Amino acid sequence: MAKKQILPAILAGFVFFVGTVGHAATWDVDKVHSSIGFSVRHMMVSTVRDEFTSYQATAEFDPTDPSKLSLEATIEAASINTRNDARDKHLRSADFFDVEKYPQITFKSTKAVSLDAGKYRITGDLTIHGITKQITLEGEGFSNSIEDPYGTTRSGATATAKISRKDFGLLWNAALETGGVVVGDEVTINLEIELTQRTP
């Protein structure tokens, strides 16, 4: 292939950021290639990592104005998966998420700040167990996109946040004979998301 033909082929396969400069686009989370999870200390000696398997999430962002980045997510609390049926049942009960009364966990961003080297900070309202608190996600991504072999434009991002489960009314615990408790208070939220751009 001639050199003058190679450059257009490369540019066609890689699109900087959203692709249409100056216009916000809507993106949906590709759940096949994403995870929404959390981690918490167990019995003071290890960290258990779990996830939710049923959720809907969208993002909007404009490459010319990162402050307009917005995220929304709705998670089905009953979809919690810790790879242990007895533990999942307990987490769904009134001791923790009480999914019969509070079936959904939601997040809606209120502010976004673009930092250096593709990093960002998003502040928003997280609702768990019927209680809404403001949290801050620290992450990286939304800085480039590609077009896959099927013509779909894709982007990706990661983010974490630390919360206190007690702030959301998740108070159950049990003391250990050796000291300490079964479940830690601090919970780390972990997001690994791949997004697909909606067709205008």
Image (tube, rainbow, N blue to C red):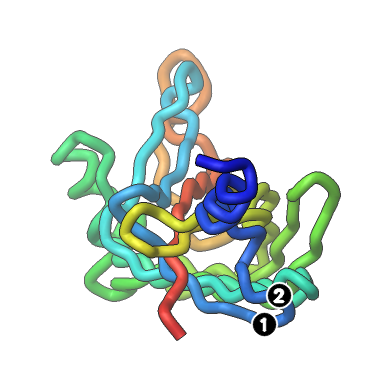
Q: Seen from this angle, which residue lies furthest right?
A: 116
Total number of numbered discs in the rendering: 2
Amino acid type indicated by mark 1: His
In the orientation shown, which residue stands out farthest toward the front? 2
152 sits to left or right of 23:
left
Residue 53: x and y in percent read: 27, 54
Circle 1 packing at 10 Å, graded few (<14), some (14-19), many (20+), is few
For this orientation, the residue located farthest to the bottom is 200
Disc 1 + disc 2, Cβ < 8 Å: yes
Of residue 155 and residue 123, the one placed in the foreground of this image is 155
Which residue has dot 1 on it? 23
Q: Does residue 2 appear to the left or right of 194 in the view shown?
A: right
> What residue sits right under mark 2 in the picture?
21
> What residue type is disc 2 on?
Val
Tell me if I can see residue 131 in this picture.
no
Residue at (74% x, 58% y) in the render = 121
